[in-house]
Image (cartoon, rainbow, N blue to C red):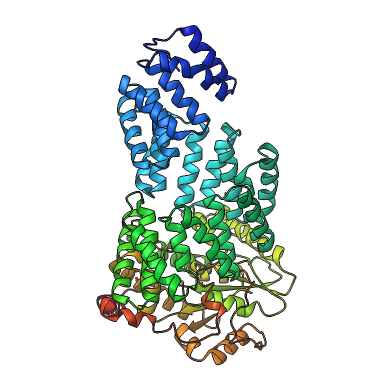
Amino acid sequence: MSPEDIVAPRTAVQISIQYYRQGQFEASRVALEPLLARFPQDAYLFNIHCALCLQLKDYVAAVTAGQRALELRPDYVEAMGNLASAYYELSDFTAAEDTAKALLALEPSDLTGLVVSTECALLREDLKAANRWVSDLIGRHPSNGMSWYLNAKLQRQNGHVAQALQACQRSLSLDASRESVVILYISLLLELGQYEEAEVGLQHAVHAWPNSRGGAHLKAQLLLAQGMPEQAVDVYERLLAGNFEESAALNLANVYRQLGHYDEAKNILYRVLDQNAANAKAILALSQIPLDLKQLSSLVTMAESASTHEQLDLSDRAHVAFALGALYAHQENYKQSFQAYKQANSIRAKQHPYDEVADERLLNEIIQIYRDLEVRSRSPVHCSITPVFIVGLPRSGSTLLEHKLLQHDGVTSIGECEFLNRELGIWLREFDGSATCMEALRHLFKGYVKILESRAAQNSIVIDKLLLNYRWVGVISLLLPRAKFIWLDKKPISACWSLYKQQFAGYEFSYQFDTLVSHYARYHAFKTYWQGELPGKITFVSYEEWMNAPADISASIHRSLGLTPSNGLLAGVKKGTLINTLSSAQVRDPISSRFVHEWQHYQSELKPLENRLESALRSDFSFGYGE
């Protein structure tokens, strides 16, 4: 703090500053307050007061002090930074951004201004702006851990988890004292399935910050990843007993939903809404849980009111619109349901632009790499178990199939494991055909086999149900000859509608009809190519046929894997089983065909989409796949 234009006696001010530097913030404020009363025209004093209130987490007082400092001196850069931080902590992100923008206009390299601007862009999921701010941060402050921390948050939001982990490690190497960086680091390890490393990091975090609520959150996530949901519930319950915190409550409600304990989940979510009736995440979560007619009507009213709330950012508006789409559908009000889904997707399309050229290029490159690998001298990677890959598009029965197969002894699952899709994508970008590159591919698959073998005994079956692995069926079949594939398929219009009415990370094409059609046509051609290229290795399952003849199709799937059809082929999944997908409620009911024709409720609204699909699928979307 540079005491420019100071009016108050410097000795008196120095006492307050000394307390501040010693971390005695309350004592610093006590020493400062008489000076504020005596010298109400001293901008420097109000700036100190703003900084003190930030440390004391009295953000309302911080805003008042920061505003007064700027009234007295409008070009006070440090006060702008403190005020922007105070606005951010109060979740007034518009005011935070506007203040940071004014600050950067005066001082383009100011760290606080760049940090607040980046954080706000990340919150509203404006990844283009966030990328610009992060580049500026790293360019101007390459040795500041905060620059790399925000780069890690950006990479994670882009879905680049491995790159996010590297950026986080760089941040920690520069400054390991920030709890938020350590928490993000452990969270990324959990996402990457590196549970042992995450546990070590968690022990360090708990030792360094014994009362860390973030550490408790991560402990619960680790317990969930290790298949101990009841223990995770205990952690969240203890958190909420001390202080009813929104994020902990939402996480606990999500665990209850995944376990099928819907009454418990609803109780928690309604408590969140009691505190904030416009909480978009709680409204969306409730829309995904079975509700009675009274609850449904009440939630529709609440969601409609929330949709007009001025404080909602774009992401929350999308959450509420998706919730209203589902709620109106439950009321059989399909016209309004479609309009709500359309609004939600319009927001998501603006937030997450779809790169159609990159999408097309990726599928073509994968085909070419497969052809290249076919003619090369290569040796498969030894695997003592049978990996079963469930692939295709979302909402085609993958969760249901996974849990039907898990009824057998000797069958386990690693869930939606991102490892192969992530690592093969990185490997593909660096492919140069060299021996080193080929060895890197084998090393990659050896790492994957270690994940599989850590979860299962020899000669057993392990399911990987990351649907996006459909991209890699060819490469996987070459490196893991024992692998089996079940490709779930759905009628084109039904598949596209299932994508359109849900928020799926990594499916940016699904937010507009035009991109839905072009992507689905490419996907269909891609699937057709592998149908011809890998005869007998892939079992193709029609969702519609499965739901209409569940016993026959289920038995056929089991036999294709060498399993004896079980007695519970038609029964729903039991309450208490952890199901961490949007299908949690649906798969608990007995198998039926009631969802097969769901899209027909929107037939008039979807007629343009249906016509475009029919036209596109008649066109040549093969891109030379069959050559």
- State the residue in front, 71 or 601: 71
Tell me which corner region of the image, top left, top right, bottom left or bottom right, holds residue 19. top right
Please state if 91 lies on the left or on the right of 415 as rendered: left
- Counting from the top left corner in percent of width and height, residue 463 is at 62, 72
For image coordinates 70% across by 39% down, the residue present is 207
Which quadrant would the N terminus be assigned to in this image? Answer: top left
Front residue of this view, candidates 39 and 81 = 39
Q: Residue at x 50, y 44 (%)?
A: 152
Which residue is located at x 56 percent, y 15 percent? 18
Q: Of 96 and 350, which appears nearest the observer?
A: 96
Q: Quadrant of the C terminus?
A: bottom left
Q: Nearer the viewer, residue 191 or 369?
A: 191
Can you give x and y, in whole percent of width and height, for residue 322 in the image? 38, 65
Tell me residue 160's x, y (percent). Answer: 49, 52
Instruction: State the image quarter where residue 438 is shown.
Output: bottom right
Does 240 sit above or below residue 321? above
Left or right of residue 164, residue 134 in this image: left
Q: Residue 376: x, y in percent?
A: 54, 65
Query: What is the tally of numbered marks visible in this picture?
Result: 0
Q: Is residue 9 above or below residue 217?
A: above
Q: Quadrant of residue 573?
A: bottom right
Is residue 302 at all visible to an observer of this figure? yes
Res. 505 visible in picture? no
Q: Is residue 322 above or below residue 334?
A: above
